[in-house]
Amino acid sequence: MSSLFALSPDELTAVRLSLWVALWAMAASLPFGLGVAVLLARGRFWGKSLLNAIVHLPLVMPPVVTGFILLLLFGRRGPLGRFFADTFGIVFAFRWTGAALASAVMGFPLMVRAIRLSLDAVDRRLEDAAATLGANAAWVFVTVTLPLILPGIVAGMILSFARSLGEFGATITFVSNIPGQTQTLPIAIYVLTQVPGGDLGALRLTLVAVVISIAALFASEAIAYRATRHGAAS
């Protein structure tokens, strides 16, 4: 029974890498997700429907296709991949950074949707009242809008984190399966199911994934509840 809960060094590495990738994917997506959500909720411009379609495309497109597109764009010979490598020294192909990028892309629509729904629910009269008192648009957003949509932002972050933690298709297509470098939790589970005697290891990692997902959901509920109470009190 003890062997069921004793993770091997390779399995621990996969768990740590998955958490690291998911955290980076969530953090890197947040400023872009907030900006795009504001554009889609409040903006009036030509091409808004096209932007909305592009943002949500990863939800309906096969993850393998998304991974292949990322490989074409951010691979070592891709235009964006070459730019980031030459300018910032960041390499995505076959690195954990690429796994984070793939996870961020797949979780981005969920983050944007959660924040946008919160923006749509904001009472615009509160913002108008702050504006009549002399506050500019940026100050109104920071002091009025942002606290009101904080639960939606938290929900979007948790959804992005959970989606990143479970990402498989785009990741394995873009960065392959390199133990210690790109072998995240879902990929490690898949590999273990393909080798003789790997079922026990796959079960261990599955239990870990379930525990992390449940913990993330509970944390999301707790943080959103506290944010809602804080916003109501203020």
Image: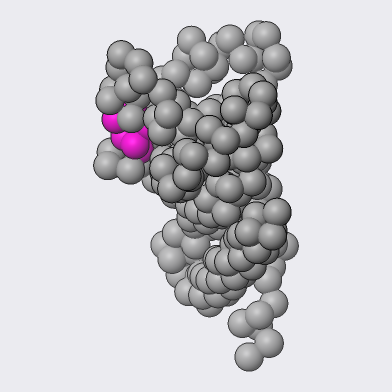
Q: Residue at 30%, 13% (x, y): give it.
A: 46
Q: Confirm whether the magenta stretch covers residue 56.
A: yes
Q: Give the range drawn in magenta.
A: 53-58
The residue lying toward the viewer, choosing from 125 and 151, is 125
Q: Residue at 48%, 31% (x, y): give it.
A: 38
Q: In this view, does 136 lie above or below 79?
A: below
The extreme front residue here reads: 133
Residue 129, image x, y percentages: 57, 35
Quadrant where the image shows the C terminus: bottom right
Q: Residue at 49%, 39% (x, y): give it.
A: 125
The residue lying toward the viewer, choosing from 212 and 115, is 115
Residue 58: name its quadrant: top left
The residue lying toward the viewer, choosing from 69 and 147, is 147
Residue 214, image x, y percentages: 56, 71
Q: Residue at 41%, 33% (x, y): give it.
A: 41
Q: Confirm whether the magenta stretch covers residue 74.
A: no
Relative side of 27 to 52, left or right? right
Residue 48, image x, y percentages: 32, 22
